Amino acid sequence: MTQENFDKILLSAVDEGLCLLGDSPKQVLLSNLEHPFQIEEKDIPSNLNEFREALESIFGSGAIFLENAILKHLHDALGLAFEENMNKDFLESVSLAKRLTLKKEETAPE
């Protein structure tokens, strides 16, 4: 899997996770990411730390629920087991999923 493919899967997981908000609130959130936070939706994978900080700024401690929804969709899309844990660090979890996916593909027989 390439970085580009992983980023597409991650962006899709973000989109699906944000669907918990409903369509209109999701669109408002994405718009708010662009204007005070200067993060375009397409750039979320390369600005993941800023995205997490924006979620925490907007939702406070409630951001963890969106982060977990995103992580669940990401793990499902990558074929990885997901164990919901409200104490998991979002960035570390995404990084681990990426490493596991790359490792799984490196060890897969051709």
Image (tube, grey):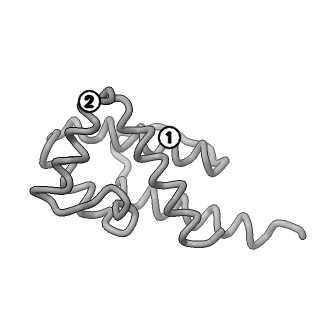
Name the image quarter holding residue 64: top left
From the viewer's perspective, tell me whether residue 10 is left or right of residue 59: right
Task: Point out residue 98 in the picture as x, y percentages from the top left corner.
Answer: 55, 64
Give the quarter of the figure containing the N terminus.
bottom right
Relative vertical location of residue 18 with respect to residue 38 in this rendering, above or below: above
Residue behind mark 1: 72
Res 109 quadrant in image: bottom right
**Residue placed at 49% from the left, 48% from the top?**
12
Q: Position of residue 94 (x, y in %)?
A: 45, 58
Nearer mark to the viewer, of 1 and 2 = 2
For the point 56% across and 47% down, the residue is: 75
Horizontally, residue 63 falls left or right of residue 46, namely left
Towards the viewer: 70 or 87: 70
- What quarter of the picture does the C terminus occupy? bottom right
Report if the CB atoms under discs 1 and 2 are less than 8 Å apart: no
Q: Position of residue 86 (x, y in %)?
A: 35, 39
Pick the front one: 80 or 9: 9
Judge the density around disc 1: few (<14), some (14-19), many (≥20) Cα neighbours within 10 Å. Answer: many
| Cα gap from disc 1 to disc 2, whole angstroms | 22 Å
Label 1 secondary element = helix
The answer to whether residue 18 is above or below residue 96 is above
Residue 30 spot, x, y in % from top left:
25, 46
Counting residues from the N terminus, which is met first, the one under dot 1 or under dot 2?
Answer: 2
The numbered disc on residue 33 is none
Q: Name the residue type under label 2.
A: Ser
Q: Residue at x 51, y 62 (%)?
A: 96
Q: Please give the label number shown on residue 24.
A: 2
Total count of labels: 2
